[in-house]
Amino acid sequence: MGSKNIKAIVIKPPKTHRASVINHTWFSKLMKRLQEKLRRSNLLNHDKGLLGVYGTPIAAEILGKNQALPVKNFQQTHLDGFEALGGKAMFAKNLLNRLACSMCPVSCRRETTGIGVRTEGPDYSQISSLGKTACCLISKNHILNASLLRSGIRSY
């Protein structure tokens, strides 16, 4: 294809109709059962669950305590001071508001403040990719600054 100067091929799927629920009674019962499971979950409960209260950065603490942090692309699995990046530290110092994806009862996303900017995050993926994994940063402000530079500063 390169010899024919073709750069890409676009395949457009046929337009399909949106999925619909056939049995509304069954679906409603299913949704109620799922919501009840979420309410009982130690991880996902909105008010008491680890993700609901501390957000995705709690993973840094859990992985750190079990020496399973992906430090330097798993060349190492422990980093001193990992607690400073966790959900509990962020909850205590930087949390402004809890955010949720559409229709999600957990609210694991966070609106935080740091380096004079109000923004969303950092979440675990930003902490692991910009912090302990790549650069071994232990400062939330450095990770927040790198995250803002990567995604563009959104001040409110």
Image (spheres, grey):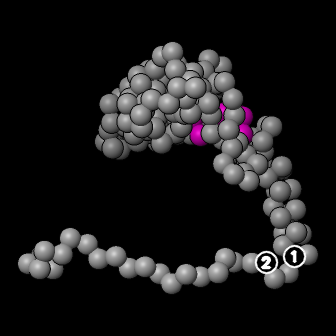
Q: CA distance from mark 2 to mark 1?
A: 6 Å
Mark 1 packing: few (<14 Cα in 10 Å), some, or many (20+)?
few
**Amino acid on which disc 1 is placed:** His
Left or right: 114 as drawn, with respect to 52: left
Left or right: 41 as drawn, with respect to 26: left
Q: Secondary structure at mark 1?
A: helix
**Which residue: 55% across, 29% down?**
119
Q: What's the magenta region?
A: 50-57
Type of secondary structure dominating the magenta stretch:
helix
Report if residue 108 is visible in the image: yes
- Residue 7 is situated, as x and y percent measured from the top left of the image, at 20, 70
Residue placed furthest toward the left: 3
**Amino acid on which disc 2 is placed:** Val
Q: Which residue is mark 1?
A: 24
Which quadrant of the figure contains the C terminus?
top right
- Residue 142 is situated, as x and y percent measured from the top left of the image, at 41, 22
Residue 86, compared with residue 69, is above or below; it is above
Left or right: 150 as drawn, with respect to 66: left
Q: Is residue 4 magenta?
A: no
Residue 67, compared with residue 80, is above or below; it is below
Report if residue 67 is visible in the image: no
Q: Which residue is mark 2?
A: 21
Image quadrant where residue 27 sits: bottom right
Label 2 with label 1: CB-CB less than 8 Å: yes
- Residue 117 is situated, as x and y percent measured from the top left of the image, at 52, 20
Image quadrant where residue 99 sits: top right
**Which residue: 69% across, 34% down?**
98
Q: Which mark is residue 110?
A: none
**Near-viewer residue (27 or 50):** 27
